[in-house]
Amino acid sequence: MGKNKGARIIITLRCTECRKRVNDNGKTGSLSKVRTKKIDYTTTKNRRNTPDRVELKKFCPNCNSHTHHKEIR
C-alpha cells in the first residue's frame, strides 16, 4: 500500500519584480538591470488551509531588497 499524499505540499516562490524585468528569451527591456541568477525559495504549505497561491515578502539578491515572491507551478 502506498502512503497518503497528505495536506502539506512543497511549493516554489519566485520574485515578482525580477519576473517583470526579464523577458522569456532572457533579454531585458528598457531597464538596465539584468537578472544574474534565478533565485527561487522553496517552502511548504497546507493545501487545506491555503488553497490559493501564496505570496510572501522575501529578500531578493538580484533586486537587493525585500520584494513579494509568488508561488509558481
Image (cartoon, helix red, strand yellow):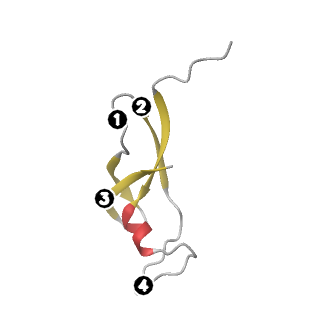
Q: Are marks 3 and 2 in contact (CB under 8 Å)?
A: no
Q: Residue at x 31, y 59 (%)?
A: 66
The residues tagged by marks 3 and 2 sit, at their Cα atoms, a distance apart of 26 Å
* Structural crowding at the residue carrying mark 4, measured as other residues with C-alpha within 10 Å and reported as few (<14), some (14–19) or many (≥20): few
In the displayed structure, 4 sits above or below 54; it is above
First in sequence, mark 4 or 3: give its number: 4
Residue in the picture at 38% in, 28% down: 48
> Residue most toward the bottom?
30
Q: In the image, what residue type sits under mark 4?
A: Ser
Mark 3, residue position: 66
Looking at the rendered structure, the kind of residue marked 2 is: Arg
> Which percent across, then down, holds residue 58?
35, 52
- Give the SS element for disc 3: strand
Q: Going from the N terminus, do you reach mark 3 or mark 2 first? A: 2
Asked whether the residues under the numbered discs 2 and 1 touch, taking CB atoms below 8 Å apart as contact, a structural biologist would say yes
Residue type at numbered disc 1: Thr
Residue 40 in the image: state x and y as whole percent: 49, 54
Quarter of the image holding residue 2? top right
Q: Earlier in the sequence, mark 4 or mark 1?
A: 4
Q: Which residue type does callout 3 highlight?
A: His
**Left or right of 28: which side holds 16?**
left
Mark 3, Cα crowd under 10 Å, few <14 / some 14-19 / many 20+, is: few
Q: Which mark is residue 32?
A: 4
- Distance in Å between CA atoms under marks 4 and 3: 19 Å
Q: Are marks 4 and 1 in contact (CB under 8 Å)?
A: no
Q: What residue sits 34% from the left and 35% below the top?
A: 50
| Comes first in the chain, label 3 or label 1 | 1
Residue under label 1: 50
